[in-house]
Image: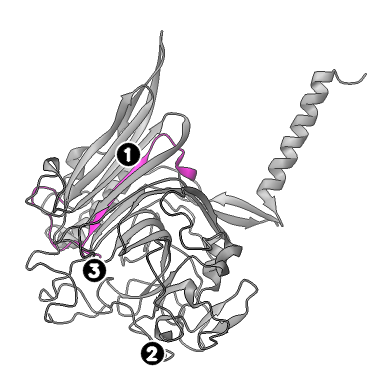
Amino acid sequence: MGMPMIHQHLHVLFLSVTLFLISASVARGKQYISAVGDPGMKRDELRVAFEAWNFCNEVGKEAPGIGSPRAADCFDISSKLHRKGKHFSLRHCVTEAHNKLGVGKPLPGLAPAAVNNSDLYAVQKELYLGSLCQVADVPSPWQFWMIMLKNGNYDSKSGLCPENGKKVPPFPPGRFPCFGEGCMNQPNLYHQHTHFLGGDTMRGSFNGTYDLGSDIKGGLDGISFFEVVWEKTVGVGSWVFNHKLKTSKKYPWLMLYLRADATKGFSGGYHYDTRGMLKTLPESPNFKVRLTLDIKQGGGPKSQFYLIDIGSCWKNNGAPCNGDVLTDVTRYSEMIINPETGAWCSPNNVANCPPYHITPDNKKIYRNDTAHFPYGAYHYYCAPGNAQHLEQPVSTCDPYSNPQAQELVQLLPHPIWADYGYPTKQGNGWIGDSRTWELDVGGLSDRLYFYQDPGTPPARRIWTSIDVGTEIFVSDKDEMAEWSLSDFDVLYTSHDS
């Protein structure tokens, strides 16, 4: 006997869906798997943390009454059935007492040298908060999405920041913004624990200001401000992270990013153990990044808004970093989508260009090939300050803003990036053009130029931080950037055996 008609329809539907799923997940022998603990930000039981830094990715000095500038909001959800339906409640893993911990206060496993050292204490506090938030998973447990805030002021008279990893004496002011002593301070931080607004919608936030004598409740005129508000309905879609960043005369260079960092080891820009969301570290060329970005205010002409920023660390001889700040080099690639950001790389200024560009079919175009080199695709390239065999002319990166030397490849929207799903013209993804992007970050990052000593084996390009946000780079007036980020995922390919 044949199947009843409805069963035949269901059978055909089942086969169609199965074939679709197989074809969607396996393309050319590749299957995409999420590298993050919270794929697409869809997990109701959120894990999010906050970190603030001074100019050279240290703490320096804590803000009065705030504690070490590390905090977290992590919770589990329980539900009970009532006559009117399900009732949800949140059980927080991190208390405000945890978030207020600072130098001099005990922490589990705190080394004696870290008790009164604000830089070392912050490292230990991040690990402790990670232990409170940690989720068991395969192939690695994971901890949280990371909100990173950074102050670009540098008091050059302080001697606080090393030069390409080397301790150097103070030097006269003027090269970096600083209103005087204390300009590298940590911010006031205010936290609203995630809670139910009513119904099944949850919301929480971190916000504050670097202007320590100011009250943000009295208005934001003339003062700096940062805020991240996250919101989600139980069981529905993605968390939406709403960001605001405002500069001021005293704080004209500020950075705010949402990061997926390594769950252990060095994240981009650091030289000690960190915690994060990347339970599998993506390696070029086999990964993609998916996200939805809606920019509401751009932050003015100095806002280097990064649709995507990837960071890692390897030595100039290709070896992985080991925490030796004299020989480690942080490597970054950043796609800037602010249409007011132009190309510093040009035929007349090849020192701001990488030595060559590599096409999707792996052809090299040298920067002196004025007929073919895509100058407009590069905002700025700078080489590590500790490299020994640089091709001249060259621009070297700021030697002070990371604990070790750094290398930057900053990209702009350009048709040359079309094969990777990146913006192809100015204005793509900017204000009024909210989009869900699927970026072949692995494919593109595999073909970017990064410096290596001649004759050394190529470094494995394993990325320990992937983030989105803006760096308002020394604004000459108060500026506000505002954007929302959701659906963030990092997908790597697994080759079928």
Residues in magenta, as a range: 39-67
Amino acid bearing label 1: Cys
Amino acid bearing label 2: Gln
Compute the Cα span from label 2 to label 1. 45 Å
Mark 1 surroundings: few (<14), some (14-19) or many (≥20) residues within 10 A:
many
Horizontal and vertical percent for residue 175?
19, 77
Mark 3 surroundings: few (<14), some (14-19) or many (≥20) residues within 10 A:
many
Residue 384 part of the magenta-drawn span: no
Q: Nearer the viewer, residue 50 or 75?
A: 50
Q: Which mark is residue 56?
A: 3
Horizontal and vertical percent for residue 249?
15, 61
Q: Residue furthest right?
A: 1
Q: Is residue 375 left or right of residue 155?
A: right
What secondary structure is marked by label 3?
loop
What secondary structure is marked by label 2?
loop
Compute the Cα span from label 3 to label 2. 23 Å
Count of marks, rendered view: 3
Compute the Cα span from label 3 to label 1. 28 Å
Q: Nearer the viewer, residue 416 or 262?
A: 416
What secondary structure is marked by label 1?
strand
- Residue bearing the label numbered 1: 74
- Residue bearing the label numbered 2: 388
Horizontal and vertical percent for residue 254?
24, 60
Quadrant in the picture for residue 134: top left
Tell me which numbered mark, 3 or 2, is placed earlier along the sequence.
3
